[in-house]
Every structure is written in structure tokens, then in C-alpha cells.
Amino acid sequence: MDIKRVATDAVTETIVMTVVHMDYKGQVAKRINEKMPLATVKGFRKGAVPKDLVEKQYGKGIKQEEIQKVVDLALERFVQSERLNLLGTPLAKVNEDFSWDTEELVFEYEIGLVPNFELDLEAKNDIVKYVVSADAKLVDGQVERIQKQFGKAIPQEVVAADSDVTGTFTNEEKGINNATTIAADLFKDKATFDLFIGKKVGDVVTVNTKGLFEDDHQLMDVMKVSHDDVHGLNVDVNFTIEAINTAELAELNQELFDKLFGAGTVASLEELKAKIKEDAENQFAQQADQKLLADVQDFLIENTKFDLPSEFLKKWLQTVGEKKLSPEEAEVEYTRSERGLRFQLIEGRAMASSDIKITFEDLKTFTTKNIRQQMAQFGQTNPTDEEVQGIVARVLSNQDEVKRLSDQVVAEKLLELFKEKANPTTKEVTYDEFIAASYGE
């Protein structure tokens, strides 16, 4: 068999395979002999059919099967031996004049290659690393929310400016159906709550999701909208009022502090505010890291230039998956996924150049930290090592969870790499300023 590569351009090639009789005749003859005792032809007893009749009835199909096996194996070995770094999988080129009866059979496979490119993680940039502080306004607001949450609910007939309104947000088209409690300070524009003033139980108020909250991510909590859908969501939602209450604020005492944080953790209003500030800033730090990672991704995608085998990938997308795509659908899918593919290649190059590897100990440490954080959220502030490691072992026995957590570990390691190499400018801001920087408002 003769195999060669023919370049189309820098990222697309054709593998040309020429198969001759010697490449498959031995296996075809073996299959014919194996078929002889089992062959059934009208007029002959089973197992007594002449070989020429067996070959006539079954030979063509056996020949095609064995040739395809030879081609598939040779193609796989050739890709490995040439150390080809492929995007997608080889695509057989259709030859309208192909005939299984010719002496030399030529098979052609189109392949897309991972491009070669230079990655400069230290390139000059204007990326900002935000350090977000919880100011007094935010902390005082959270104190009041805690007092309302643990205070005594007093039913009201109609909604007033200080009411807590319980009800359900719905939008059938987007699958929104979530019960929640709202107050005047929930919305970005306080005038939005004026739509509720004077309403009674059973009344329906309609609001639009676009710009409804300071942070679009609140749609995930208030309406249970998925993360992929929150940004730029612009639909009307109905809120059906089910209860109206005002709150008699809870007293800030040791009983409340212990209920919130465990016995003895907080002993005064000042310590409560310090704890709220600490917890909020830890959460803000995670959000700031997510923005930093997204900004670095955008910068690297825009400033790392390389060609992709786009036409090949569009054809390849038509062949994969349970539902075959039309050329038009493949075009849309390629456009949707191109940036993600570009960053996936950049990410791989960054990991390789910086020798970043994920070990089982990395995964175990990361999972242990996550489990402890989750347990703390549910009031288990001091679990034993045995309890935590038991949960970790169960989590890491699930391959889907291992894949998900491994991706998070990679993202964490890359974030640290980007912080070091990209050398972003550090800027201290309030949460409101951070939201404005994130969403341009």
C-alpha cells in the first residue's frame, strides 16, 4: 500500500491511499474459506456449495469489508506515525468514478490540522485585575436584610414601599417558573417596585428582564435562569402575588449571631459587619477572577493570529452527532463555536509551554476545598477530615464529576498563570463600580 500526504494549505491536507490486490487478498480468501461450511445456495446442501458459487454470492461484500478494514487500520497507523495533530477526524472524499473492480483502489481522506502559532502571554495589554471592596452601604444593607429575614412577618392587605412580596415569576417561552420574595431594594431601578405598590394578593405585575437587576446574574437566583441565558435576556415576565408582608426587624443579639454563624463566632454588631464584609469580598474576588479570566481570553483570542481549517470543519460538523446538519446549520454551528475552539488551542499551548499538568493530588485538594466550602454554606463549619474525605472519595468515583472538576482545576491553574504573565493592572473598586466596569453601566 502506498500512502502519502498532499497539502491543500497550511492547515488542510489530503491523505491519499493506494490499495492493491496484495494488501487484502489473503484476508478475503480466509473469509471465503470460513464462509464455505455456512454458505446456503439453492440446490446445494449447506456446507456443500462449490467455492466458485460462494465467491460469486459473497465475495464482493467480503472484499469490500476487508478492504475497508485495511484502509481504516492503515489510516489510523499513518496518522499516529506521522504524529498528525488533527482537528476533527478524517473525512472520506467522495469519488463519483470509484469502482471496486479496478486493480488499484485509491482512497482519499481530507484532514484538518492544528495550526502552528506563537503565543505571547506577556504581550502589552490594558487588562485590569479588580479588587472589589464591600463598602458601608453594602454591608449596612445586608445587615438590614438579615434583620428582615429573621424578623417577624406581619401580613398586609396591599403592597407598600416597605413590603416584602412573595409570589412566582413566570414566562412559558423561557421556561421560567420560580417562587421568590421581592422587596424595593431588589431591582436596579427602584421605580420598578412602584409597579407593585397598591397591588393585592392574586394580582399580576409584568416586568422586563433587561436591566432589571444591578447584576444580570441575579436572574439565576430570582428566576432560575441558566447561566448561558442571563446576559442580554430581554423578555417580559409575570409576577403573581401570593403573599404581602412587612417585617418587624429581628433584634441584633447573640442568639441571632449564633444562628447565623455558629456559637461564639460573632459577638457584636461590629463583628457581624466585619464578617459580612469578609464573606462578601471573598465572593467578589471570585467574580473578579472570572472577569479577569474572560478578559484575558478575549485579549488572547483577538491578538493571537492563526488560521483554522474552517471549510473542513464545516464539512466535518455535518457528519458528527446523532442529527446530521445541513451546510447552513453547520455554518451557524461553526460560527458559534469558533472562538471557543480558538481559545481551546491557545489554552493547550499555554499549558504545554508552561508545563502545566493536572495530578490526582491537585484534583483531590481542589475537591476537598470545594466540599468544605459547600458544607460551611449549610452550617457544617467543622466537619472531620474523615467525613470530608469520604465525600471526596465518592465524588471522585464519578467520571463525569472528575471531568468537570478537572476542567475547574485547569481554569484555576491557567488563571494563576495569566495573573503572573499578563501582569494586569490592579484597581480597587466598590461592587457598584465593578458591576459598571463589567456590564458597561
Image (spheres, grey):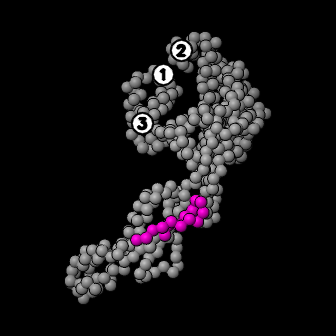
For the C terminus, the quadrant is top right
Few, some or many residues within 10 Å of mark 1 (<14, 14–19, 20+): some
Query: Residue at left 61%, top 45%?
Result: 119
Q: Which residue is mark 3?
A: 360
Query: Residue at left 67%, top 27%?
Result: 132
Nearest to the eye among marks 2 and 3: give it: 3
Q: Which residue is mark 1?
A: 381
Q: Is residue 114 visible?
A: yes
On whether residue 286 falls in the magenta region, the answer is: no
Q: How many marks?
A: 3
Considering only vertical position in the picture, is 212 above or below 342? above
Of helix, strand and loop, which one carries label 1? Answer: loop
Image position, residue 257 (x, y; %): 57, 15
Disc 3/disc 1 C-alpha distance (Å): 26 Å
**Which badge, 2 or 3, comes first in the chain's sequence?**
2
Of helix, strand and loop, which one carries label 2? Answer: loop
Considering only vertical position in the picture, is 296 above or below 163? below
Disc 1/disc 2 C-alpha distance (Å): 11 Å
Mark drawn on residue 420 = none
Q: Which residue is mark 2?
A: 265
